Amino acid sequence: MNHGDHTVSSFDNDLAQLERRVLEMGGLAESQLQEAMAALVKRDIEAAERIIARDTELDECERKIEASALSIIARRQPMANDLRYVFGNVKIAGSLERIGDYAKNIAKRSIILARHPTVPLPPDMAALGAASQRTVRDVMDSFTTRDAMKAEMVWQHDHEIDDLVSRVMRQGISRMSQDMIKMPRKDPEVIECSTHLLFITKNLERVGDHATNIAEVIQFQLSGGWKTTPRSKGGDDLQSAGS
């Protein structure tokens, strides 16, 4: 947002403060997701517990953004571009809060998985986590720079995460099936861990979806119109069945 165009300078200050809060929330959501994946890979229970404890910080960020937006609307009665910007930031905050929730969910399931270190992660789980983190980082970069083309790239590349989700789900289900066949006595702990890994996979898919939603909001803020064409979806019937 290009601030400094209003007759009342305090209006520009209000908008700048709102933007700073969104950027702060975006950085926190990205950090939470990165640390959740690190806790999963390292089987780090203490790190996972810290992520869960910090989730309230994202909730507080969202409340501050909503309060700032309502205050701006009530006091400034913004029009056109300014109103789109304020409204869009509230929607972005909602998506960032959900990304934080998914990071918290991953951390919770990581604690269970850490107690069973012999159950391996699917081979492409790390790649899926990295792709989800990159998508959040790229979309917040596009917000910072008001770069519509970068937001469009995030939107266009959502299918890449879908493809990785499909691969990881197949790897997880295949491993679960092999374990059930090989084990003379069915081990409920192995099945439980495999199920948690499938839920983590779906959490990461939803992170990508929310990053794509943020990209759509940024394009709306800049152009004044919502995208009307459906985005390309990857994956396959197995992934769709789990949605």
Image (cartoon, rainbow, N blue to C red):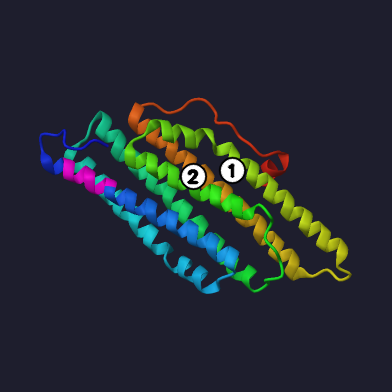
Query: What is the distance, in whole Å, between disc 1 and disc 2 at their CAs?
Result: 9 Å
Tell me if label 1 and label 2 are in contact, CB under 8 Å.
yes
Which residue is depicted at the point 27% across and 30% down?
A: 81
Where residue 209 sits in the image (x, y, percent)? 52, 43
Q: Work out whether residue 243 can be spotted.
A: no
Relative to 225, is 156 on the left or the right? right
Relative to 28, is 237 on the left or the right? right
Q: Quadrant of residue 160?
A: top right
Is residue 14 rendered magenta in the image? yes
Q: Quadrant of the C terminus?
A: top right
Where residue 207 sits in the image (x, y, percent)? 52, 48
Can you identify the residue that label 2 sits on? 135
Q: Quadrant of the N terminus?
A: top left
SS type, badge 1 = helix
Is residue 140 rendered magenta in the image? no
Q: Write the start and end of the magenta stretch as one range.
A: 12-19
Q: Nearer the viewer, residue 162 or 85?
A: 162
Amino acid on which disc 1 is placed: Ile
Sort mark 2 into few (<14), some (14-19) or many (20+) by Cα contacts within 10 Å.
many
Which residue is depicted at the point 60% across and 55% down?
A: 126
Q: Quadrant of residue 125?
A: bottom right
Can you identify the residue that label 1 sits on? 161
Which residue is depicted at the point 55% across and 28% down?
A: 230
Predominant SS of the magenta segment: helix
